[in-house]
Image (cartoon, rainbow, N blue to C red):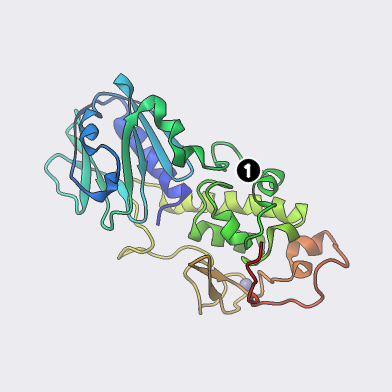
Amino acid sequence: MPELPEVEIARRNLERWFQGHRIVRAEADATRVFRGAEQAHFTRLTGRVKSLERKGKYLLITLEGGHGLMAHLGMTGKFVRRKQGESVPYSRARFHLDDGHVVHFSDPRLFGRMEPVPARELWELPAVKALGRDPLTEGLTGPQLQEAVGDSRQDLKVALMDQGRVAGLGNIHAAEALFRAGLHPARKPGTLTPDDWKHLARAIHAAFDFAFKEQEGEDITYLEEAGSVNRFRVYGRAEGPCSKCGTTVESFTQGGRTTHFCPKCQPLSSVASPAARKGAAAGKGTASAVTRPKPRSRSR
Ligand SMILES: [Zn+2]
């Protein structure tokens, strides 16, 4: 499932494919990727691409003539480039280029979204305006992460996935970052130390860098697809050994999603977290490491 790194890879590919070329024809099938948007306006998306921007998981494409397109890959959407005449499974929309290539938007499950709008309105779309800080284009330091997430009363992983706080983290990379930082997904943001935030911000960048290294290329295979190999450190590894310590990786449901974590590397007790240990935060947190999240009351 595409998150910030996968969408950024798509952006870089599109930028390279469109560079120096013109879209001679744009066409789209009537599918629900257009939802309330004007599907007919997709055919206006011709000529040169002036800019290809991204915020979180949203792609914002500006063409000459003032036309724009917001694209969201949803769960299974991807852009692929093929020679004219080659078929692409689940192709929902197509850009025909003047170099004999066709850029397809392929989406088997149709959770992706396309919204053709005037380019000047792209950044004003409510879904885009509601996004929080983009770690890649706007930077993300420990203090910035604490400012964005620290006041949330939700579990740390759920708060990290809140697109209005940090834009672009989803289930996979939130789990990977927490594992790298040694933080339990059910920690409450208010219990983290400045060192914890610093480690977590670095871990988010490290998880993204790893994803770029493993996945960047013309064609991307998402984890849920046949033929993909799970190269992630903790995500999808429940019941298997932790890649760091060998302890059995556990999973539980959190905010409606499955969370994977190592109970030894990511203890729930703040006193046992590597960052807290390093900072010798004596007297803080509880004395014993609790490895399973307790049932939580939802009072606010
Ligand atoms: Zn471990």
Identify which residue is drawn at 37% across, 58% down: 222
Instruction: Judge the density around disc 1: few (<14), some (14-19), many (≥20) Cα neighbours within 10 Å.
Output: many
Q: Quick one: SS at disc 1?
A: loop
**Residue 259 locus on image (x, y percent):** 53, 68
Q: Where does the N terminus fall, quadrant-wise?
A: bottom left
193 over 128 or under it: above or below = below
Q: Left or right? Give the position of 198 relative to 13.
A: right
Provide the residue designation for mark 1: 140
Looking at the picture, tell me which residue is in the foreground, 127 or 111.
Answer: 127
**Residue 123 locus on image (x, y percent):** 45, 32
Q: Where does the C terminus fall, quadrant-wise?
A: bottom right
Question: Is any part of residue 52 visible from this angle?
Answer: no
Q: Left or right? Give the position of 122 relative to 104.
A: right
**Residue 179 locus on image (x, y percent):** 60, 64
Amino acid bearing label 1: Leu
Identify which residue is drawn at 68% across, 62% down: 188
Question: Is any part of residue 14 visible from this angle?
Answer: yes
- Quadrant location of residue 161? bottom right
The residue lying furthest to the right in this view is 283
- Quadrant location of residue 23? top left
The residue lying furthest to the left in this view is 85
User: In what quadrant does ligand 1 lie?
Assistant: bottom right
4 over 230 or under it: above or below = above
Identify which residue is drawn at 14% across, 46% down: 86
21 over 224 or under it: above or below = above
Identify which residue is drawn at 50% across, 48% down: 168
- Quadrant location of residue 271? bottom right
